[in-house]
Image (cartoon, rainbow, N blue to C red):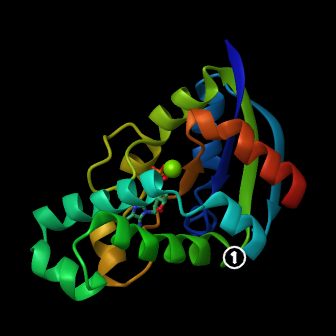
Amino acid sequence: MQSKELIFLKPDAIEGKLVGKIIARFEEAGFKIVRMKKNLISKELALLLYPDSKEQLTGMGNKTLTAMSQKGGMEMVTKLFNTTDPFEIGKQLNEWNRKYASSTEVIACILEGEDAANRARALIGKTDPAIADKGTIRGDFSKDSIYMGNMERRACRNLVHASDAERAPVEIGYFEKYFF
Ligand code: ADP
Ligand code: MG
């Protein structure tokens, strides 16, 4: 079934002059661009985009624990976050996310295509570029990693945001109101 998906190219995509290559991936996969605009994400929109939901925060916190279990270890986690609880770690990550997303302009698009959110998320690949598969946008174009981001106390620069399927209509609504 045709559906819509919200994506935005993060500051590192623009800085790295990767906009054309990333958009091409979506077009080559059959997506149609319905809307597209470069603008700043306001503090207000960043709060809506990265809400403090327990599930989301715990999920992000667990990504730090996974990344750190390969490198750095739990001692490093405690040093960086003062806790090893994924939910508590996630709260700090969300602050970094809001700051990064609203630091400089991004390019947001509403895409339309078959099973749009799930297919867009498959194209972008795993959150941590260090373990994202080759052939995905993050795997091919990002040189950052969750480990490097955590060590520098900042969000991981992984080029593109794409809504989860259940969040797509909600995030599209927020962007229609506060961005486009
Ligand atoms: P995704 O973007 O793959 O949907 P999430 O929704 O879990 O990933 O996280 C939102 C964004 O927060 C990620 O794209 C990434 O930039 C950042 N992020 C998530 N987890 C971490 C982490 N453990 N360390 C640093 N940044 C993170
Ligand atoms: Mg997400």
Residue 180 visible, this orientation: no
**Image side of residue 161 versus residue 149, left or right:** right
Going 65% across and 58% down the picture, which residue do you hit?
49
Q: Position of residue 164 (x, y in %)?
A: 55, 39
Going 86% across and 49% down the picture, which residue do you hit?
176
Q: Quadrant of ligand 1?
A: bottom left
Whether the residue carrying mark 1 lies under 8 Å from ligand 1 is answered with no
For the residue pair 140 and 38, the one nearer the viewer reads as 38
Q: Position of residue 162 (x, y in %)?
A: 58, 45
| Quadrant where the image shows the C terminus | bottom right
The residue under label 1 is which amino acid type?
Answer: Thr
Query: In the rendered image of this protein, does residue 92 appear above or below residue 31?
Result: below
Mark 1 Cα within 10 Å, few/some/many (few <14, many 20+)? some
Going 73% across and 34% down the picture, which residue do you hit?
111
Query: In the rendered image of this protein, does residue 40 appear above or below residue 26?
Result: below
| Quadrant where the image shows the N terminus | top right
For the residue pair 172 and 38, the one nearer the viewer reads as 172
Going 86% across and 60% down the picture, which residue do you hit?
178
Residue 29 visible, this orientation: yes
Which image quadrant is residue 88 in? bottom left
Q: Position of residue 143 (x, y in %)?
A: 37, 63
Give the residue furthest to the front.
54
Q: Which residue is mark 1?
A: 104
